[in-house]
Every structure is written in C-alpha cells, then in structure tokens.
Image (cartoon, rainbow, N blue to C red):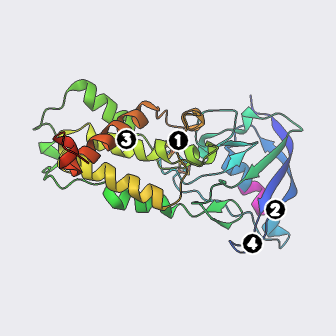
C-alpha cells in the first residue's frame, strides 16, 4: 500500500572537478513509497529549481536497469544497501519515514567527479576500445544460429554480457579495481567462437589499458561481486587471469616452447 515518507538527504555537492565538495542537507517531503530513488531526486530538484537554486546533478538515461549510468553511492554502498539493483530500480519503499540518506558520487581516482554525483567513466570506454570487439564476420540476424555454441558456454557468455558498465564494482572495491568489469567483457567474447581470433591480444590490450587508467589491483575482497547489480561473478576474474597468463605465453614464444626467458 502506498505510503508517504519525510526524509533528510545528505547530498555531495561539488561545482566541478576543480572545486572542493561538501555534503549539503535537503529535506525530501511527502515522498511516495511507489517512487524510484531517481524520481525522489526529481521531486527534490523541482523544489530546488522553484526556489532558484542549482538542482542536484546526477547521471541517468534508461531508468530501466540497462544503461548503467545512474551511478551513486547511497548510505555507503554503490546503488544502495537495500536492494541488489541499479539506483533507478531502487524503490522508496525500501526506506522508512524519518530516514537520513547520504548520497555520494563513485569514489575512485579513474572516475573523476564532473559535478555533484556525476563522474567521468570514460576510462571504461577506453578499455572497451582497446579490445572489446571482434573482427570475425558474423553475418546478419538470420545467421545467428549458423555457428553452434555449446549450451554451457552460451549461458556463461550471456551471464557475462549482462554487465552494464555501471562501475559499482570499482566504487565498492577498497583498491578501486576494475577487474570485475574487464573480466566480464573479456569473458563474454572469450567464451564464444566469434571471439577467438583476438582472444589473447584482447585480454592483453584491455588489461594494459585498465592498468594505464590507474585502476587498482584485485586482492580478492569480493566487494565487487557483492555490489554488482547484474550478478557478475568473480569466476570471470579467474577466467581472465587464466587467459592473461596464456596471452603472455602466446606473445613470448621462447616461454611457450619451454626455452630460456
Ligand atoms: S561488473 Fe557489475 S558492477 Fe561492475 S560495471 Fe559490470 S554491472 Fe556494474
Ligand atoms: S538509468 Fe539506466 S541503469 Fe539506471
């Protein structure tokens, strides 16, 4: 049954990437439990605009859990601690009347704050550009079933392809590691026959780009998996590590053949 909540928001406000930011309190009154978290922010912003104040800047696009842009840390957890989903799919029925909710941007060096809750996740785009593609001709839609794929591999590839590039894994990791994201993209293509021609150059190039973007290393905390709204598992990291080792052998033939080096 629909109820209404009166809340206090503690929101990170930061004019731009060069300015210092701070938390600012805002009341959020008469918020329907049927609203999504972003709709609640819309209501608060309409109030700010009416008063001639600068609305809270936040990223969003699909509002359906698909695009991965609605990135924010809610009460200390990426996408919030209440439901394992994206912020746009988080509902206000998960909160209680009188709650104080803190809202911050992703905190990671490779994701610099642009304004308020919006960060620049261009580092992810550059990692994809480094190798997240195939060159094999795959034909048109009607050719989709022409190349048989073992069921288990098809299922695992589909699971990995569920990654929406939101960056919650990076924001949750104490090292700001991007291993879960990169391993999902590497696994998705490495599990399919169409991804084989670039399989080992892909993992090498994407990991090199990840490192150059200054993401941290993985030390198996598991916070990434716990925060991921799409259920991407750390098995993908193990698969990527195996492929990365094989790529070193592939590109250093003296080792692959057992020679010195
Ligand atoms: S692995 Fe999960 S948390 Fe990380 S970018 Fe992909 S969907 Fe988001
Ligand atoms: S707005 Fe697209 S996933 Fe949330």
**83, 246: nearer the viewer:** 246
Of 127 and 241, the residue lying toward us: 241
Where residue 229 sits, quadrant-wise, is top right
Q: CA distance from mark 3 to mark 1?
A: 21 Å
Q: Quadrant of residue 107?
A: bottom right
Label 2 crowd (10 A; few <14 / some 14-19 / many >=20): some
Compute the Cα span from label 3 to label 2.
39 Å
Q: Which residue is mark 1?
A: 218
Upstream in sequence: badge 3 or badge 4: 4
Q: Are marks 1 and 4 in contact (CB under 8 Å)?
A: no
Q: Nearer the viewer, residue 52 or 161?
A: 161
Q: In the rendered structure, find residue 47 and report the number of the disc placed on it.
A: 2
First in sequence: mark 2 or mark 4?
Answer: 4
> Which residue does the image show at 53% across and 49% down from the upper left?
166
Residue 74 appears at what percent x and percent y? Answer: 72, 45
Span of residues in magenta: 42-47
Residue that label 3 marks: 161
Disc 3 is placed on an element classified as helix
């Amino acid at each position: 049954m629909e109820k209404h909540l009166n809340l206090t928001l503690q929101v990170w406000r930061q004019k731009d990437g060069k300015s210092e930011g701070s938390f600012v309190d805002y009341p959020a009154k008469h918020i329907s439990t049927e609203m999504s978290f972003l709709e609640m922010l819309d209501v608060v912003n309409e109030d700010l605009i009416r008063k001639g104040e600068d609305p809270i800047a936040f990223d969003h696009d699909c509002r359906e859990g698909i695009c991965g842009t609605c990135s924010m840390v809610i009460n200390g957890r990426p996408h919030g601690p209440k439901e394992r989903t994206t912020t746009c799919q988080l509902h206000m029925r998960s909160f209680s009347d009188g709650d104080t909710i803190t809202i911050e941007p992703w905190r990671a060096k490779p994701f610099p704050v642009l304004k308020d809750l919006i960060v620049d996740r261009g580092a992810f785009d550059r990692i994809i550009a480094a190798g997240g593609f195939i060159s094999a001709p795959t034909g048109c839609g009607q050719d989709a079933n022409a190349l048989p794929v073992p069921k288990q591999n098809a299922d695992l590839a589909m699971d990995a392809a569920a990654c929406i590039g939101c960056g919650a894994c990076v924001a949750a990791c104490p090292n700001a590691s991007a291993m879960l994201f990169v391993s999902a993209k590497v696994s998705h293509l490495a599990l399919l026959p169409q991804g084989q021609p670039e399989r080992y150059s892909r993992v090498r190039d994407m990991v090199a780009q990840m490192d150059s973007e200054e993401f941290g290393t993985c030390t198996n905390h598991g916070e990434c998996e716990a925060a991921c709204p799409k259920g991407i598992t750390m098995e993908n990291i193990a698969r990527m590590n195996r492929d990365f080792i094989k790529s070193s052998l592939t590109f250093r033939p003296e080792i692959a053949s057992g020679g010195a080096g």
